[in-house]
């Protein structure tokens, strides 16, 4: 190897080592970057720390340690609260967005004015495995609009005898839904566990919740069939199970009577099959009669009950109270809509995006209070039942993406409140309805039906049979019959003309005989001249 080659090798190694050092320095600087903590949030966390003491018996986990010990006031190293143990900050804004103080040996009592509730940007909070004695769930928890809890739901809800409302929706809870109402002494009226990651089957103890009015389980990962056993609940008004992993045919129980007060049913985006047992689900009277209570909302008086350890006076209960208004998210008028309040008289059915078969039940026409009906994206067959014309309060009707046939019933013109109508992608035939609300619907409401015609579709309808000209007799019976018929008309005309001519001739000869003779003579001479001489 020459001297020049050796120098080139050393130069290459030198340059490569410099590049590696620059990369490592840059990586170290990126990893050591800590967002700047806001002073107000820094102070709030320090005050939160001061409100509790460290007690080794406050946590049961063997790896527990006091995370707040690393929290130091200004003037010390690692001043930024974003560097403290258990604290997570947004890299761009520096706001505290996460707090994990699980198993931190915290001992003390929460108050409603605790500085923790001033961290309004908080999105995750974990305080598990600590001992917050004599504490109640404060109303201040509502200060966290972005907070999402995680973990498994505790199994202590069954101890809350006076609990009327339980809302744990829009979080990251996993595992199974805990047992509630193990006895019929429960006061539970509302449960919302929607938009979580709950698994498994529904607890059969829900059938003991005899005061339950609203059960919202949408957007989970259950693996269960339809809970027909909930049909015995006398007060159940809302049952929402959208996109939650339910499947199979809905079995008919021995008794066809169930759900006596049901007003909102959402089974959409599951994997239900077979025919829908409407005579069982809709056997109640509420949908049939309607509710005359537009000013009232569905609500419950919500008690939060926390049971503490026994003291010398026995078991202690701390309770807070406020009115809780039911809410639900539904597909309404073609759009997903969140209802923060539900009127007592609002009634809706959504069976869309399943694999239901058979005909649309005529019984649905008896549900006079119905405002919204969506059975789209199934495998329904047969005709659109004319009984739907009885739903005078109906505002939205979606029958699209099925295998329906026949014509659109004329009686649907009676639905004067109808704002959204969709029968697209079926096998419907005939003329599209016009008049009233149907004059406002666009062609997207009807597309995918080759047999439909008329505005607003580009396909025009043929002239109705009643307006066509009658076929000629010649076309029906052949040309010979037509000739005979024409000779009959000619003969009749000849006879009538002869009669009229004789009568007129008699009249003229009698009145003007001389003048008549002269005229006849003149006509004879003219005829002779026209003929000319014979050859």
Image (cartoon, grey):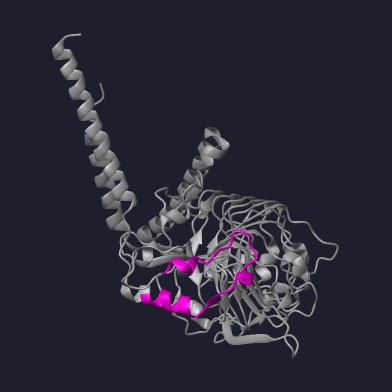
Task: Work out whether residue 499 can be spotted.
Answer: yes
- Residue 369 in view of the camera: no
Is residue 49 inside the magenta stretch? Answer: yes
Closest to the observer: 305 or 268?
A: 305
- Depth check: give the residue in front, 104 or 235: 104
Q: Residue furthest bottom?
A: 313
In the image: residue 32, left or right of residue 46: left
- Percent x, y for residue 306? 65, 80
Is residue 34 shown left or right of residue 413?
left
Q: Is residue 132 above or below residue 13?
A: below
Residue 366 inside the magenta-drawn segment: no
Percent x, y of residue 517 = 30, 52
Q: Over which residues does the magenta segment extend?
A: 43-71
Q: Is residue 463 left or right of residue 429?
A: left
The quadrant in which residue 155 appears is bottom right
Q: Position of residue 379 (x, y in %)?
A: 63, 48
Residue located at (59% from left, 54% from top):
269
Residue 342 placement: quadrant: bottom right
């Amino acid at each position: 190897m020459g001297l020049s080659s050796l120098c080139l090798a050393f130069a290459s190694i030198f340059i490569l080592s410099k590049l590696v050092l620059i990369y490592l320095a840059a990586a170290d600087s990126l990893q050591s970057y800590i967002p700047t903590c806001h002073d107000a949030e820094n102070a709030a966390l320090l005050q939160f720390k001061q409100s509790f003491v460290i007690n080794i018996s406050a946590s049961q986990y063997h790896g527990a340690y006091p995370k707040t010990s690393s929290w130091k006031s200004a003037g010390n190293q690692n001043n930024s609260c974003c560097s403290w143990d258990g604290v997570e900050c947004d890299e761009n804004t520096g706001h505290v967005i996460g707090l994990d103080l699980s198993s931190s040996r915290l001992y003390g009592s929460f108050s409603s004015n605790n500085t923790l509730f001033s961290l309004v940007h908080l999105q995750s909070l974990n305080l598990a495995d600590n001992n917050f004695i004599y504490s109640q769930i404060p109303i201040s928890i509502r200060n966290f609009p972005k907070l999402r809890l995680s973990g498994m739901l505790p199994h202590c809800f069954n101890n809350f005898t006076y609990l009327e409302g339980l809302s744990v929706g829009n979080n990251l809870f996993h595992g199974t839904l805990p047992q509630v109402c193990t006895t019929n002494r429960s006061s539970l009226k509302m449960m919302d566990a929607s938009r979580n990651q709950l698994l498994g089957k529904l607890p059969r103890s829900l059938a003991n919740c005899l005061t339950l009015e609203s059960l919202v389980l949408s957007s989970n990962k259950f693996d269960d069939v339809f809970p027909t056993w909930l049909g015995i609940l006398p007060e159940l008004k809302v049952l929402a199970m959208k996109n939650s992993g339910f499947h199979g045919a809905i079995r008919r129980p021995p008794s066809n009577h169930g759900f006596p007060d049901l007003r909102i049913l959402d089974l959409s985006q599951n994997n239900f099959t077979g025919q829908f047992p409407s005579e069982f689900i809709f056997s109640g009277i509420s949908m049939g009669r309607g509710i005359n209570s537009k000013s009232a909302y569905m609500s419950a008086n919500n008690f939060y009950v926390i049971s503490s350890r026994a003291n010398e006076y026995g078991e202690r209960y701390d309770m807070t109270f406020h009115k809780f208004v039911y809410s639900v998210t539904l597909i309404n008028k073609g759009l997903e809509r969140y209802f923060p309040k539900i009127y007592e008289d609002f009634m809706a059915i959504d069976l869309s995006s399943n694999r239901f078969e058979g005909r649309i039940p005529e019984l649905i026409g008896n549900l006079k209070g119905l405002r919204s009906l969506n059975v789209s994206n199934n495998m329904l067959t047969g005709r659109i039942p004319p009984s739907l014309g009885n739903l005078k309060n109906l505002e939205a009707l979606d029958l699209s993406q099925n295998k329906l046939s026949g014509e659109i019933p004329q009686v649907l013109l009676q639905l004067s409140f109808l704002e959204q109508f969709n029968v697209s992608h079926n096998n419907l035939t005939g003329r599209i309805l016009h008049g009233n609300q149907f004059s406002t619907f666009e062609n997207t409401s009807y597309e995918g039906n080759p047999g439909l015609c008329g505005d607003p579709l580009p396909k025009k309808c043929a002239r109705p049979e009643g307006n066509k000209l009658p076929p000629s007799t010649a076309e029906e019976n052949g040309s010979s019959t037509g000739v005979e018929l024409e000779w009959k008309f000619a003969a009749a005309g000849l006879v009538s003309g002869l009669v009229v001519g004789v009568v007129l001739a008699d009249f003229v000869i009698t009145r003007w005989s001389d003048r008549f003779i002269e005229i006849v003579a003149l006509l004879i001479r003219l005829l002779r001249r026209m003929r000319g001489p014979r050859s």
